[in-house]
Amino acid sequence: MTVPDGSPGAKIDRRFAGDVEAHRRDAPRFCPACARDLGLANEFWEGDARRFYCWCASCDWTGEVTTTGDRAVGHEPEH
Amino acid sequence: MLTAEQNEELTAVEAGTPMGEVLRRYWYPVAFTRELTEFPVKRVELLGEFFALWRTPSGKYGIIPEPCPHRKASMAYGVVEGDGLRCPYHGWKFDTDGACTDQPAEKENTNFQERVRATAGKVEELGGLVWAYIGPDPAPLLPRFDVYVMDGYRDIGWADIPCNYVQVMENAVDPHHVEHLHGRYFEFIGRHEGFEAPASFGKKHQRIGFDAFEWGIIKRRVLAGASEDNDDWKVGHPLVFPYNMRVGGGGIHQMQIRVPINRTTTRFMLYTVHAPEGYEPVVQERVPDYEIPVFDERGNHVVNYVEGQDIMAWVTQGPITDRTTEHLGRSDIGVSLLRKMFRQSMQAVAKGEDPLGTIREPHERIDLPCEKDKFHAGGAEFAIDFCNMGSTRYSPDLEPIKQVHLDAAARVAADKEAGRPSFTPAGGIGTATLAPDTSAQVDSGLIPR
């Protein structure tokens, strides 16, 4: 039996296997507000940033988490 | 992007899965009223299970799982007798509550028939459709959404499409696709096939917004040449959780219904009510239904009409969209909001609560917000584009429908000249659902383009 795309065990689009792996590695697991398991961490991209739209099933917190790696980008306003 | 396990959970429809249990808290259209008047029994597939649906001579309806509790033969081949359905194999009979009322070959002095029930669902008729509820008791009420009860000229287009319903619902919170799929792509196809695509569909998006509300998510957009004062933004139109979208404009009111038949088949229905200002009620003996084309004779998608383009985009994602390798952007934020709503509903059902959009209070009509001036294209222009460029072109009632709009426009002109108001069927919320100078709950902000 063929497993439908998107199911566990299905053949994935190999062009993006690295993204699948990175998602599993980096998706937030715990709520920043109550520290319980997150109900949703939906990844989207914006420019160079990888962002996760999150919702906590325990405390109903909603927010975005952005991966930065070792470097965080700051800014210096004109003065 | 989700993990494979999350995608599996999101797209499941089967009993015993978190989403399957959410979906079993809603009513679904499972037949056209006319079908059961032509033959009183129908085999129905819904949420990955098969059922026998029947109509009794007195007009009552029943639905029970297809396998007879006796020896598992199909009750969809049963015999309608009185208010019950009798198995064609050995004659066991069940009433509309699922009680076994006869076992012809068994002795009468046993309690055997009281020990086997057929787990009946609930069935009601509304708006030319037969609706079923197959979830746990107590059943919520069948929501009387405006389109099903308002005055107007009706028809129902439909197609069974080979994909999971969630990818269809995610399209309902994706405003940008209109500009490309129904704008630029439509124009491209029109150029090659020799027709002119509707200009209003290609207008650029400058702002999108979403608001969660009691029935789902209101979707908003500001198109180039318009502002936040236009209906597309201040009224918007809703995704009606978990499987509908209310759309319309130009005197047309439509519910796009996406019934999860099984995990990889969706019954797509376009329940349309033509009810322009100036409408004079027309008696319809029955609501016509018609199948819309998905594939042509070569197996390619039919893409020269609006819904055919949508279907192409849904189906070509695969039977179940692989969300482990998708790449969402900021413009897909509505998709994130919908996924959150699905998860919230799974959570609510797991806690024994009703999920979003179930109703238990008796009601006459539920009005849903829907812009009247769609794409600020003008009422008549939008209605004509809708009829010619959308699924209505396949309706057996295309000409009467166009006549409804033409007659209504003439009546409005005559009423105006006579200084009297024109009749407009009641239904839908056409007034602002967002206060001026207020941001939507999820809002892109204005990006002039």
Image: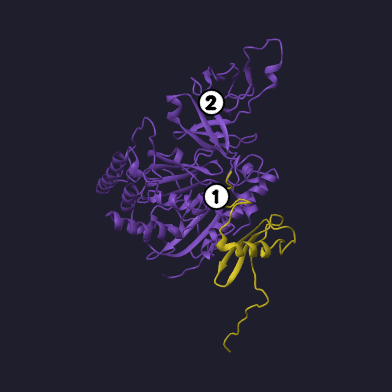
Chain colours: A yellow, B purple
Which residue is drawn at the image coordinates 26% and 48% (left, top)?
B413
Give the x, y percent position of residue B162: 49, 44
Q: Amino acid at mark 2?
A: Ala
How far separated are the C-alphas under marks 1 and 2?
A: 29 Å
Q: A58 or B149, which is in the foreground? A: A58
Q: Position of residue B68 (x, y in %)?
A: 61, 24
Q: Which mark is residue B250?
A: none
Is the C-beta separation of discs 1 and 2 under 8 Å?
Answer: no
The N terminus of chain B, quarter of image: bottom right
Residue at numbered disc 2: B76
N-term mark: 1 or 2: 2
- Say which residue label 1 marks: B320
- Out of B239 and B283, give the one closest to the viewer: B239
Residue type (three-letter) at the residue carrying disc 1: Ile
Judging depth in this view, the residue of B267 and B88 nearest the camera is B88
Task: State which chain disc 1 sits on.
Answer: B
In depth, the one of B123 and B276 nearer the eye is B123
